[in-house]
Image (tube, rainbow, N blue to C red):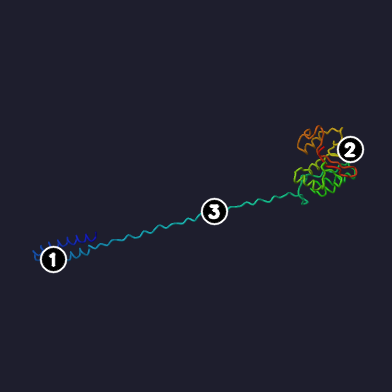
């Protein structure tokens, strides 16, 4: 395209020069012819155009947004299960929060000593001491048992029977007395067919088991837990059932 334009311009100038030469020749002025020739040279030189190369547009800078760092997950480690202990450092039992009751004044010396040993060991959750207080003659179940400490601990921790709590709460009541067997008994009315439980005694039993007294009876008989200590200080039984 550029070459074609140059050719056209050259042809046009040639025609102009011819006409000018003829005109000036007729006029006889050589200086004018020279001016026309210079004009032609200038036009030819100016015919070379310079095409400007557009400046390269710089690519916009890209700002890199840092990726969001995920917060590390927090693994909650469960706290270890802690078995409560008594002030003596042994494993707590159902009687751990009870106060040892005072020794009933009606008990003889031997029976009182056994009573004291039982309640103190129970609130301390000391099964070995309870076994010592029990001796060899105690009845804890009608099915028999081989080891007093093991029997009581199994009832407490495996079966949740809360035998030690029941034992202490029974011994908090005033004892009854079976003259035929020279034995102090808890609850007060146990073993006396003619005894009628008082309202206070019924309330004490209801507090132990959490149900109305009449619902505890079996055909009118109290067959739940009872304790017997004889006059010689022998712990005879801590048992329930018929």
Task: Choose the circle earlier in sequence order: 1 or 2.
Answer: 1
Q: Which label sits in the foreground, 1 or 2?
A: 2
Q: Name the residue: 54% across, 53% down.
A: 70
Q: What residue do we see at 50% from left, 55% from top?
A: 67
Which residue appears at 83% of the width and 48% of the height?
Answer: 131
Disc 2: which residue? 178
Disc nearest the viewer among 1 and 3: 3
Q: Quick check: 81 left or right of 165?
A: left
Image-based side of 58 in relation to 140, left or right: left
Mark 3 highlights which residue? 70
| Image location of residue 129, percent across then percent down | 83, 49
The front one of 8 and 13 is 8
Q: Callout 2: 10 Å neighbours few (<14), some, many (20+)?
A: some
N-terminal-most mark, 1 or 3 = 1
Q: Residue at x 76, y 35 (%)?
A: 211
Q: Secondary structure at mark 2?
A: strand
Residue annotated with mark 1: 33
Circles 2 and 3 in contact, beta carbons < 8 Å: no
Q: Callout 1: helix, strand or loop?
A: helix
């Amino acid at each position: 395209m550029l070459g074609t334009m140059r050719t056209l311009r050259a042809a046009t100038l040639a025609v102009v020069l011819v006409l000018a030469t003829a005109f000036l020749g007729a006029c006889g002025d050589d200086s004018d012819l020279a001016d026309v020739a210079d004009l032609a040279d200038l036009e030819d030189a100016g015919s070379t155009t310079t095409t400007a190369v557009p400046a390269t547009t710089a690519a916009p800078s890209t700002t890199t947004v840092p990726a969001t760092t995920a917060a590390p997950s927090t693994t909650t480690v469960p706290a270890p299960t802690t078995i409560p202990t008594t002030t003596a450092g042994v494993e707590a039992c159902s009687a751990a929060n009870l106060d040892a009751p005072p020794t009933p004044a009606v008990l003889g010396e031997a029976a009182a000593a056994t009573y004291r040993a039982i309640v103190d060991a129970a609130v301390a959750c000391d099964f070995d001491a309870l076994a010592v207080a029990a001796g060899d003659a105690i009845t804890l179940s009608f099915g028999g048992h081989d080891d007093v400490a093991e029997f009581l601990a199994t009832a407490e921790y495996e079966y949740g029977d809360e035998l030690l709590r029941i034992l202490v709460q029974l011994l908090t009541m005033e004892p009854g007395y079976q003259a035929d067997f020279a034995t102090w008994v808890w609850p007060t009315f146990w073993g006396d067919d003619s005894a009628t439980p008082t309202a206070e005694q019924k309330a004490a039993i209801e507090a132990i088991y959490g149900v109305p007294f009449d619902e505890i009876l079996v055909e009118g008989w109290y067959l739940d837990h009872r304790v017997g200590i004889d006059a010689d200080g022998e712990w005879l039984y801590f048992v329930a059932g018929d």
